[in-house]
């Protein structure tokens, strides 16, 4: 009896001791997982390179990836969205301010809260490469810059019309796969990314990632070399095809992902097999250091915020002087301010002397011609010179 | 004089505490200032209003105005601003960094049809327009201008960075400052317009974020992009200028006005029924005023009531205002009072048309078009109409034409009633290829009840092949002409700015009673330049390869091919006969 009691109490004490030990192990594992991927912030560069109304589907592609990325947590300040043409407020759009991805107008991917950073004619190869490498003119605003550092995971999504080794920008210029690979190498050397996921949805898309040579790059494409990527469904009310097949199934896959989901890259590689897509999606992972099975979808599509809790207090000292009181004192005469006359006719007429209205024309007049009481046109004798303010010498017409 | 009729009772303290535009005193410019209250802490203020004006064609015009008053003057020595309460920080930093005195930016989709809709409260040209007055302390105005356009393109998500010296002009007489000030040295003014700029939700989103309440409360809940962009005309603008801090007008405060004008079309948004409600226009109703607003009102223009339409729910508050030279009566819905919202806690105005009416012809109206044929020359015609029966008035016409339309100013003619009309002032700055556009400003006296036509011939330039846009066959845009005028008013205008004047009538300062200032924008022009065939290299390669293949290939074959005589094949009958003959051992047939 005694021995039996001792045994049960020992087992009970052992159980009591091991529970907190198991729990701390669990917490350590979770913490270990939290810090294992090595990145601290997420960026996304989403580019649509096609112009004209019949390329509606490329804008819808880009906006659906934008919508997923925003939904999973990346804020607008960390997304560079480039749309080469405006479909939502296009005059041919029967429903303005909307871009639909599913037929019968089920899902509006444009939304109410979109911020497009580069639009229209600004989407050029030069601007795209400048955004990637960070070599922008000094007056570029922050929303148009990719301010990533060496602990950033970047998602790059390109869509448009492409071919074997190139991608067309706005029907007037191209970017080649070698230029893209060199841009990524520049980014690696400048430590502008930790890991990079490159997704491209164009015809013969796999040719664009063939030439990559920088480390930590993973790439996905919608079709192999020699294959065309096809569009999904047309909408008869809008009159154009709404999405491409690969991005349509990618959007369906991403709609199931939530910020805490454990889906990994192997699931992403299985999106849109040949039976659904008609083309064969491809991927490239040889430059990536981690095993794709251990890479979470949210490592690239979601946003990680690392929070450090501190219990120290910080004293904020104010370095500003208090606002000077605006009240006047005593009997000081202060002029009351007035508004300016919007059309002071008399002042305008007497503003400049007639000397300054001498205009010279190089081709059409042989002698001075009086056009109005104060404008004379005479033949140019001297070569033109630069002046930026109204002056007394004759001005030459541009030509 | 405009006396509010049936005015809503306000606390006297509240009325005194509000600081609005100046009370102009023409008799003496200086005043002795009494000792002001010592506890004059900075008082920011926010007012919002919506004006609904039914139009005679069955369309409806809605104009939102949000006014934020920022009681600070950071150009004084020793003042450093770091506390932003109602005024948005992004714009405040822009103002201080670039020493901006006034900033006016507008984004417009569609063209305002003056003949059908009358005059807008705040006019704007199609596309984007930006004009800025800098302070006279700025040494490099062009540098500041360039950086300012880049920063604004980031704030408003628009491609304003395309504004550079090739489309910026420095008007010499137009665009005088709308705010306080004395000296107007036009070297500190810059004006640019981008007629091709699109307006969409991505421009509306940051605009809404500048409001103190955002789009969560007050009148801004009505701003839903799916309805706003499904309209004939949509214009959103930001106007920043210095105004008087109080009635004595001894110091300045910054005023930020955000305006949004929209005209809903009877057939596309109204489904053909002449019946409008807030829900039909905006797919929302009003439920509360913005808590940060000192006044939040909805005005409905009922001057043509009750013959034209009927309005429900009825309201006892009425207000009269003289705006655009006409005395109009408005029904006022004050959103800061709970009884406005009724039992359902929501306000949905309903306007039902009862009859048709005739609109008064606007007194000033302008048009512009390109005449001529071919891709070498053309002629720009600007037509200005003065519809006043007996009064003549002067207008200032400003034209800014890009350098690739080479104007021949010696062909400039101004005719009124088929007679020459000599302008009393002309300022012309010729273009410099790839550096500067043409600028033509003229002060023309319009005779009463007349049409004035300004024509100038031009020649189209051939651009370098890298200068064409990706879609050059669409054409190239020429910005709208601006016609500024002092139009004689039918009703005496109010020159005293009282505190209780509605926002829509207090935008442009009024200096004299007999006329009001108006700005009319013409259509932008779309001009085709001689465009090369960009598929030409591909075609040349195909043609050359074909010629080489056919020509050289044939020649090569002739030289190197050898010919051999070929036995003709016999018909079937003879072949069978030959077979039998071979068996028999007899000579064959040929």
Image: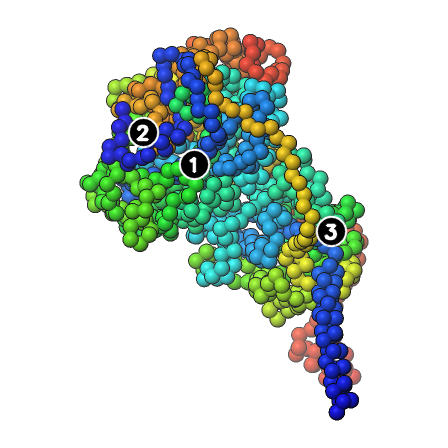
Cα distance between the residues tagged 2 and 1: 22 Å
Closest to the camera, between mark 2 and mark 3, is 3
* Secondary structure of residue under mark 1: strand
Marks 1 and 3 share the same chain: no
Q: Name the residue under label 1.
A: B46
The residue lying toward the viewer, choosing from B210 and A81, is: B210
| B345 left or right, relative to B539 | left
Closest to the camera, between mark 2 and mark 1, is 1
Closest to the camera, between mark 1 and mark 3, is 1
| Number of other residues with Cα within 10 Å of mark 1, as a class: few under 14, some 14 to 19, many 20 or more | many
Q: Where is residue B268 in the image (x, y as percent from the top left)?
A: 36, 49
In this rendering, does residue B191 appear at all?
A: no
Picture quarter containing residue A290? bottom right
Cα distance between the residues tagged 1 and 3: 43 Å
Marks 2 and 1 share the same chain: yes
Q: Which residue lies furthest to the front in this view?
A: A2
Q: Mark 3 points at which residue?
A: A151
Residue drawn at x 54%, y 24% as measured from the top left? A324
In this rendering, does residue B72 appear at all?
A: yes
| Number of other residues with Cα within 10 Å of mark 3, as a class: few under 14, some 14 to 19, many 20 or more | some
Q: Where is residue A278 in the image (x, y as percent from the top left)?
A: 62, 67
Picture quarter containing residue A31? bottom right
Residue drawn at x 74%, y 71% as measured from the top left? A21
Residue drawn at x 45%, y 62% as measured from the top left? A104
């Amino acid at each position: 009896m005694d021995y039996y009691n001792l045994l049960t109490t020992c087992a009970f004490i052992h159980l009591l001791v091991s529970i907190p030990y198991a729990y701390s192990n669990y917490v350590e594992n979770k913490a270990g997982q939290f810090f294992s991927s090595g990145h601290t912030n997420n960026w996304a560069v989403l580019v649509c390179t096609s112009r004209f109304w019949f390329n509606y589907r490329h804008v819808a592609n880009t906006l659906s990836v934008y919508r997923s990325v925003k939904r999973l947590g990346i804020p607008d300040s960390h997304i560079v969205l480039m749309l080469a043409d405006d479909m939502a407020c296009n005059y041919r759009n029967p429903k303005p301010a909307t871009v639909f991805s599913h037929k019968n107008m089920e899902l509006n991917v444009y939304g109410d809260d979109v911020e497009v950073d580069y639009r229209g004619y600004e989407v050029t190869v030069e601007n795209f490469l400048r955004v990637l490498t960070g070599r922008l003119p000094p007056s570029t605003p922050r929303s148009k810059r990719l301010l990533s550092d060496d602990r950033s995971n970047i998602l790059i999504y390109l869509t448009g019309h492409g071919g074997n080794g190139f991608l067309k920008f706005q029907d007037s210029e191209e970017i080649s796969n070698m230029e893209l690979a060199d841009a990524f190498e520049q980014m690696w050397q400048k430590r502008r990314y930790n890991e990079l996921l490159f997704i491209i949805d164009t015809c013969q898309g796999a040719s664009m990632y063939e030439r990559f040579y920088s480390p930590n790059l993973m790439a996905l494409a919608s079709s192999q070399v020699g294959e065309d990527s096809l569009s999904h469904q047309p909408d008869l009310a809008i009159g154009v095809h709404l999405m491409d097949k690969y991005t349509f199934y990618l959007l369906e896959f991403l709609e199931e992902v939530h910020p805490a989901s454990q889906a990994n890259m192997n699931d992403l590689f299985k999106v849109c097999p040949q039976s659904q897509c008609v083309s064969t999606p491809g991927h490239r992972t040889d430059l990536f250091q981690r095993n794709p099975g251990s890479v979470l979808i949210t490592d690239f599509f979601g946003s990680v915020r690392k929070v450090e809790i501190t219990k120290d207090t910080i004293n904020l000292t104010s370095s500003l002087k208090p606002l000077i009181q605006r009240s006047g004192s005593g009997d000081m005469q202060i002029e009351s301010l007035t508004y300016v006359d919007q059309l002071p006719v008399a002042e305008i007429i007497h503003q400049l002397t007639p000397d300054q209205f001498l205009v010279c024309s190089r081709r059409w007049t042989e002698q001075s011609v009086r056009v109005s009481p104060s404008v004379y046109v005479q033949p140019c004798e001297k070569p033109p010179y630069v002046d930026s303010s109204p002056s007394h010498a004759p001005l030459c017409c541009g030509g | 004089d405009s006396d509010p009729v049936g005015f809503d009772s306000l606390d006297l303290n509240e009325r005194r505490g509000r600081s609005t535009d100046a009370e102009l005193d023409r008799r003496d410019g200086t005043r002795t200032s009494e000792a002001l209250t010592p506890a004059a802490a900075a008082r920011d203020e926010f007012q919002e209003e919506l004006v609904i004006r039914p139009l005679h064609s069955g369309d409806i015009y809605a104009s939102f105005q949000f006014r934020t008053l920022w009681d600070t003057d950071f150009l004084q020595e020793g003042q450093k601003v770091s506390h932003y309460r109602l005024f948005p920080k992004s714009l405040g930093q822009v103002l201080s960094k670039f020493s901006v005195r006034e900033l006016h930016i507008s984004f417009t989709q569609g063209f305002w049809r003056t003949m059908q809709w009358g005059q807008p409260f705040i006019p704007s040209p199609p596309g984007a327009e930006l004009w800025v007055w800098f302070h006279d302390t700025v040494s490099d105005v062009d540098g500041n201008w360039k950086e300012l356009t880049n920063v604004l393109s980031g704030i408003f998500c628009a491609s304003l960075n395309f504004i550079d010296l090739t489309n910026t002009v420095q008007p010499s007489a137009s665009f005088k400052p709308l705010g306080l000030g004395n000296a107007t040295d036009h070297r500190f003014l810059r004006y640019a317009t981008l007629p091709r700029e699109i307006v969409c939700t991505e421009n509306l989103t940051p605009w809404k974020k500048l409001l103190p309440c955002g789009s969560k409360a007050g009148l801004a809940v009505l701003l839903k992009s799916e309805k706003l962009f499904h309209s004939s005309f949509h214009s959103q603008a930001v106007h920043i200028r210095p105004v008087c801090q109080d009635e004595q007008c001894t110091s300045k405060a910054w005023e930020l006005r955000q305006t949004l004008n929209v005209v809903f079309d009877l057939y596309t948004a109204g489904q053909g029924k002449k019946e409008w409600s807030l829900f039909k226009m905006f797919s929302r109703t009003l439920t509360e005023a913005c808590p940060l607003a000192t006044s939040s009102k909805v005005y409905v223009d009922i001057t043509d009531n009750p013959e034209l339409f009927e309005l429900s729910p009825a309201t006892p508050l009425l207000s009269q205002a003289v705006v655009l030279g006409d005395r109009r009566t408005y029904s006022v819905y004050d959103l800061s009072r709970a009884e406005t919202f009724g039992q359902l806690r929501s306000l949905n105005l309903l306007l039902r048309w009862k009859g048709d009416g005739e609109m008064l012809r606007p007194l000033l109206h302008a048009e512009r078009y390109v005449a001529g044929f071919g891709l070498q020359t053309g002629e720009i015609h600007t037509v200005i109409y003065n519809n006043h029966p007996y009064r003549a008035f002067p207008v200032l016409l400003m034209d800014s034409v890009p350098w690739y339309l080479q104007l021949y100013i010696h062909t400039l003619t101004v005719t009124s009633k088929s007679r020459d009309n000599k302008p009393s002032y002309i300022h012309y700055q010729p273009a410099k290829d790839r550096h500067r556009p043409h600028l033509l400003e003229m002060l023309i006296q319009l005779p009463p009840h007349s049409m004035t036509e300004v024509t100038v011939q031009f020649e189209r330039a051939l651009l370098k092949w890298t200068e064409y846009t990706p879609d050059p066959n669409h054409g190239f845009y020429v910005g709208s002409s601006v016609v500024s005028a002092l139009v004689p008013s039918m009703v005496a205008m109010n020159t005293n700015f009282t505190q209780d004047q509605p926002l829509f009538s207090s935008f442009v300062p009024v200096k004299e009673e007999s006329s009001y200032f108006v700005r009319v924008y013409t259509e932008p022009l779309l001009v085709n330049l001689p465009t090369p065939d960009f598929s030409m290299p591909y075609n040349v390669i195909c043609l050359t390869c074909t010629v080489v293949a056919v020509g050289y290939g044939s020649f090569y074959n002739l030289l190197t091919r050898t010919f051999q005589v070929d036995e003709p094949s016999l018909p079937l009958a003879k072949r069978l006969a030959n077979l039998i003959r071979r068996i028999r051992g007899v000579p064959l047939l040929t």
